[in-house]
Image (cartoon, rainbow, N blue to C red):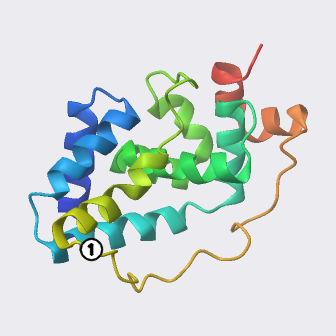
Amino acid sequence: MDETEFWEIVDSTREDAQGDPEEQADLLVERLLRLDPDAVLDFARHFEARYNRAYRWDLWGAASVLLDGASDDAFDYFRCWLIGQGREVFEGALHDPDSLADLLDEFDEEIDGDGEELGYAADEAYEQLTGVVAPDLGVAPAPPEPEGTPIDFEDDTALARYYPKLWDRFAPE
């Protein structure tokens, strides 16, 4: 599976789920079950590589603005959700996290920003196809600390300065 196929699967499941990340995860499992186990592992490698690329302080800060705070787990699930938004949103956010203010039509923190189930979809599909747990993917792990310069997520002034568009559009009142 190449990168284009990976993003086509992500995009089609998101569109079919009408943006609901839990529904998207269910549809993703269904879609992956139509593939052979090796293709499912390829999908998982693409997902994991992007998940690790998104382990950055600047993205964590953007998640903190969007979610009104983001714990370690919340940021993990946010990265899965971000991948689920497709290539344009994902790459745009990596290039400039503040651009999420322009890339997202809307953001409802009740359903958006939490793609935990998306992170498990390939594992679930692989196990259903083979009856065994997916092997190690051979993808380099994320670094022990996020890339970049740490940001004080408790400092609203700093968050508003780093993410002016996100802050104006999504910060809590």
Of residues 111 and 155, the one drawn nearer to the viewer in this rendering = 111
Give me the residue at 22% from left, 68% from top.
40
In which quadrant will I find the N terminus?
A: bottom left
Residue 46 placement (x, y as % from top left): 34, 68
Dot 1 falls on a residue whose secondary structure is helix
Against 61, is 18 above or below? above
Give me the residue at 65% from left, 29% from top.
165
| Residue, far front | 131
Of residues 118 and 69, the one drawn nearer to the viewer in this rendering = 118
Against 95, is 111 above or below? above
| Residue, far bottom | 138
Against 152, is 128 above or below? below
Q: Amino acid at mark 1?
A: Leu
Asked if residue 156 can be seen in this view, the reply is: yes
Q: Quadrant of residue 121?
A: bottom left
Give me the residue at 10% from left, 64% from top.
35
Residue 122 placement (x, y as % from top left): 31, 62
Asked if residue 1 can be seen in this view, the reply is: no
Residue 4 placement (x, y as % from top left): 20, 61
Read off the residue under disc 1. 41
Query: Label 1 crowding class (10 Å Cα cut-off): few <14, some 14-19, many 20+?
Result: many
